[in-house]
Amino acid sequence: MKFVVICLVVVALCCTTAEGDNDDVTILPYEVSAEDLIANFIIPKRPLIVKDACKNWPLYKMLHNSKKLEAIKDVKLNTSMVHHSNYAPLESTFGDFVKVDLHGTSFIYDVLNGDPAISKSLKMPWMISSCSDLQEEFKTHGDIVLTGSKTKRKSSAALDCTNANTITAILSGRSTVRKMGKKHLYELVRGDMLFTPKGVCLNVMNVGTFVSASFSWTLESDELPVMAKKCARPSLRSVVDETWVWQDGNKKYISEIPDVKLNSGYMMPPIGLGTARLFSKTYETVKTALKLGYRMLDTAQIYTGEDKINNFKVSSEEEIGRAIADSDVPRSELFIVTKLAPESMEKENAIAKVEESLKKLRTDYIDLLLIHDFYMSTACGPDDTDLPECKNNPFLAWKTMEEMQAKGLVRSIGVSNIYIEDLQYLVKMAKTPISAVQNWFDPLHQEREIRALCAKNNIRFMGYSALGFTWIDKEQGLGRDVNPVLTNQNIVAIGNNHDLPTTLVVLRWAMEMNVTVMPCTTNVDHLEQNLNSRLFPLDSMSFPLMDKLDNLLGDPFQDEELPEEEPQKEEKPETEMPEKEMPSKDEL
């Protein structure tokens, strides 16, 4: 099998063409799912090129970063002469092959039986990992190898035909490829990924230091239709604006979670990037997120520099503005959320702070401005202008925000961290409709009463800490050692049933419940996973399971305020309040 795979790897580098060309080869800017791979490329034997598909792989980054390469530089390789196969093999290391002048050599490295440092630095392609059945098939009938060549002139492989399906990731260098019988050459550059169907005949030419990783496996033809049905999952960024959900055993098509229209008339994405805890990694993370397709960024005026926190000495708004300026994403495609600092709600100060935010964000307008902390308004009413403790009165700040919206400084306005009583009053007094409310929300803390009021008044509810971070946040006073959301058995079981990570289950469920989410992470893989949660539907049986989790651990903040005699009241059933009914999904 090893010899067969070796031949495959060389040939697999050969297959690419362009979308719409008569060679019947497709080029896509996203990686397809296992179902799409089987149905649209394996069965019709159509080659596929995916652009920039492996740039986030650890091994790719090692090859282009001398410091990171240290982790695998001592892995031993056997190299041979490219143009003189009768020459004796040469012993070398991976680091020497990449860095040292070994022109005219090539190598083939068996990953599965090789050094663990190599296998840990690779990533399973989404085309395989998006389906557990296909993963099992790969474990039984698949192999992974690295190949490399280092030449000063073009090196061509003999024309051959593959005898297995192969996904080849170009980790370094470039290659030109041609399909047998065709004249057109296509170029693969580092970061691209190539799928070659079983039986396709190709030719490849590469030059310079070329390294690739190939995943090869076989599938019997009579298994393919069944496998495709079992692997039903949307592609990562499908050009088809449709996805599906299983209901009552039937496959029904629904639209991808869409953008939502706010009371202000502007559209807002259902998921964005939270930046509260990015600190010194804000710039790079935001820049990466924009490239992955994020179009909503959530920040605040108080996300500022503190030397004691990761040496972050500049503001989040400033770093976001710099990242946007250095990206190629037009401002018109972005939705920027920021929040008015609690100590800056006096009128003149509020206007000055918003103008400062505009400068830091390098924009002429803010898409959504929120009053950051309405909780502090407990002792303040809309007319309490003479009370010293109400100098920064959020009710009065709301009137200032209405003026700023009228002037075009902000497009939509809303509030954050607000109690139900204050929101009820604000709904009545607001001359401009409230566009959004942002409160803590996760499966164990579902904010049903606030969400019901928002639904009644067409206010978009935004949930921060949807993945349960608040439960383990020491600063919030909860400080649990384990995240009770991501370790909840019901949520984990739903993820297993859907072949999805627990985080995707939570985010998709939240969006299905008409909640906008802003997960925060610096991990590139998690960034991509989180964004793609809007593509992966849950079956109808998942929602009752998630509904039952609300208040499972109680309301920690409310519990802290309970009077000492409250435990005695629990012994009197007749005094207990009836359980509140959860509004239906349609009502929310």
Image: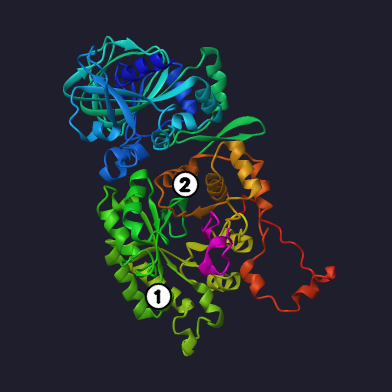
**Kind of residue at badge 1:** Thr
Depth order, front residue of 165/82? 82
Residue with the most extreme top position: 181
Number of other residues with Cα within 10 Å of mark 2, as a class: few under 14, some 14 to 19, many 20 or more: many
Residue 325 visible in the current orientation: yes
Q: Quadrant of residue 400?
A: bottom left
Q: Secondary structure at mark 1?
A: helix
Q: Determine if the magenta segment contains residue 77.
A: no
Q: CA distance from mark 1 to mark 2?
A: 35 Å
**What residue is rendered at 24% in x and 13% in y?**
85
Q: Which mark is residue 400?
A: 1
Above or below, comparing residue 532 to residue 26 in the picture: below
Q: Position of residue 263 (x, y in %)?
A: 47, 59
Q: Which residue is mark 2?
A: 530
Q: Dividing the image into 4 quarters, which one contains the C terminus?
A: bottom right
Stretch in magenta: 459-481
Q: Position of residue 470 (x, y in %)?
A: 54, 62
